[in-house]
Amino acid sequence: MHTVVPPRRLTAALAGVGCLLLPLIAAVPQAGAADAPQAAAASGAMAVAPYEYLGWGNPQKPTDVMAATGVKWFTLAFILSDGGCNPKWDGSRALTGGSDESAIKSIRGAGGDVVVSVGGWSGNKLGEKCSSASALAGAYQKVINAYHLKALDIDIEDTEFSNATVRQRVVSALKIVKTNNPGIVTYVTMGATPSGPDSNGKDLIKKGAAAGLANDGWTIMPFDFGSHSGSMGSATVSALEGLKAAVKSAYGYSDDAAYRHIGVSSMNGKTDESDETVTTGDFQTMLGYAKQHHMARFTFWAVNRDRLCSGGGSAGDSCSGVGQSPYAFTKIVSQYAG
C-alpha cells in the first residue's frame, strides 16, 4: 500500500449515480440453476487465494508463503493496459518470459496455482482502453492463454468503476470469456459502503444479471469506508449482507445461492483511513461468516503487508502497521475450505 496513492485505494463515495436498470427477465437464470450450489471449482483453495503484488511492497517469495502458511493459491496483481487494448503486468511487463511467469511456474511447481487480477486503483485500465466488449474479452483472453488460467479476477475501481459504459463493457466481456472458456471461474471485485455496494456496484451486478453473466463471485473490498461504526469485522458483515441482498435481487437467487455467489477481500491491519484498523479478530469474524454461508471467496489485500513493521513503523506497502506474527492474517484465511 503506497502511503499516498495505494494501488487499491478506494473512496467512500465514488462519483456518478448508476443507471439502475431492471434485469431482463429472459436473462435471469432459471430457478433450478439459481438454487444450485456453487461450482466445486470455485471453492476450496481457490476461494482463499490472498492477493500478492509482485511489483510492489518488497514481495515475499510465493513458495515461502506457501511453506509457512499452507496456502496453495494466490491472486496475483495487477494486469493493466500498456496504453492500448493490450494487457501487461503493471502496464509494462510482458505476460511471458519474465519474473511474473517464473513466479507462477514456481507456485505451480510447489502444488499451487493462481488467480490473475486485472485492474486495481492505479494505472491505465483495460476496460477503458479497449473500445468494445469483444476487444476487452480478447485482452482478457490473452492473459488466460498465457497461463492456462482456471480463474480470473476483475478488480474494477476508480474511473473504470464509475463509468456506466465501462461497467457494461466489463460484464459483456466476461460473458464472452465464460462462453469461450467453459469452466473458468470469474470474480468481480469492487469497493463498498458499510451497507453494501454503492449505486455503481448495484448497477454493475444488475448489468451482470441482465447480460446473463454467471459470475462465480461478486466480491467487495470492505475498507476505506470514509466512516463506519463498530468494529471492522461487524462493518464487513453488514456490507456483505448488503451485497448478498443485491445479488439475490438481481439474479433471483435463493438466500443460500446468493451467499455462495458473494465474496470478501478485506485489508489487513491499518487501512488508508485513520479510523480503520482490521485486526486478526476481525478476520476471525469474517472467517466465521464465510464458513456459515459458504461464500465463494474469502481473501485479502495483501500478503505483501502480512508482517510486522520494522522498528514499530507505520503501515505501508510491506507491513500491516499492527502487532502480529508473520503471516497471521494469511493463516486465518487459509482455514477457509469453501
Image (cartoon, rainbow, N blue to C red):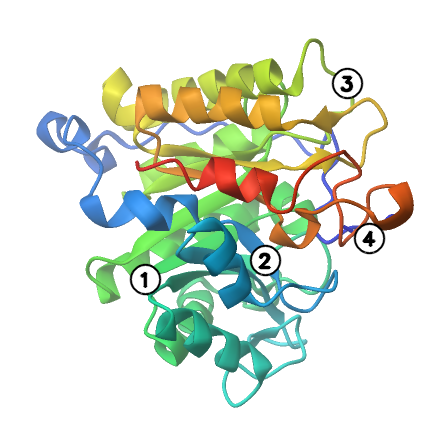
Q: What residue is shown at x 76% (from left), y 54% (from top)?
A: 318
Instruction: Tell me which amino acid carries mark 4.
Output: His
269 vs 309, left or right, is left
Compared to residue 97, the image places residue 294 above or below, namely above
Find disc 2 in the rendering and name its residue: 52
Compared to residue 287, the image places residue 126 above or below, namely below
Q: Earlier in the sequence, mark 3 or mark 2?
A: 2
**Quadrant of the image occupied by residue 47:** top left
Q: Work out how far the residue at label 1 is from the one at label 4, CA to CA, in angstroms.
A: 32 Å
The C terminus: image quadrant? top left
Find disc 3 in the rendering and name its residue: 227
Q: Earlier in the sequence, mark 1 or mark 4?
A: 4
Instruction: Tell me which amino acid carries mark 2.
Output: Glu
63 vs 267, left or right, is left
- On residue 2, the disc is 4
Q: Work out how far the residue at label 1 is from the one at label 3, CA to CA, in angstroms.
A: 37 Å
Q: Work out how far the residue at label 3 is from the one at label 4, CA to CA, in angstroms.
A: 21 Å
Q: Nearer the viewer, mark 3 or mark 4?
A: 4
Q: Nearer the viewer, residue 139 or 237?
A: 237
- On residue 203, the disc is none
Q: Nearer the viewer, residue 250 or 26?
A: 250
Instruction: Tell me which amino acid carries mark 1.
Output: Val
Find disc 1 in the rendering and name its residue: 177
Q: Earlier in the sequence, mark 2 or mark 4?
A: 4
Q: What residue is shown at x 32% (from left), y 74% (from top)?
A: 148
Q: Secondary structure at mark 4?
A: loop
Q: Earlier in the sequence, mark 3 or mark 4?
A: 4
Q: Secondary structure at mark 1?
A: helix
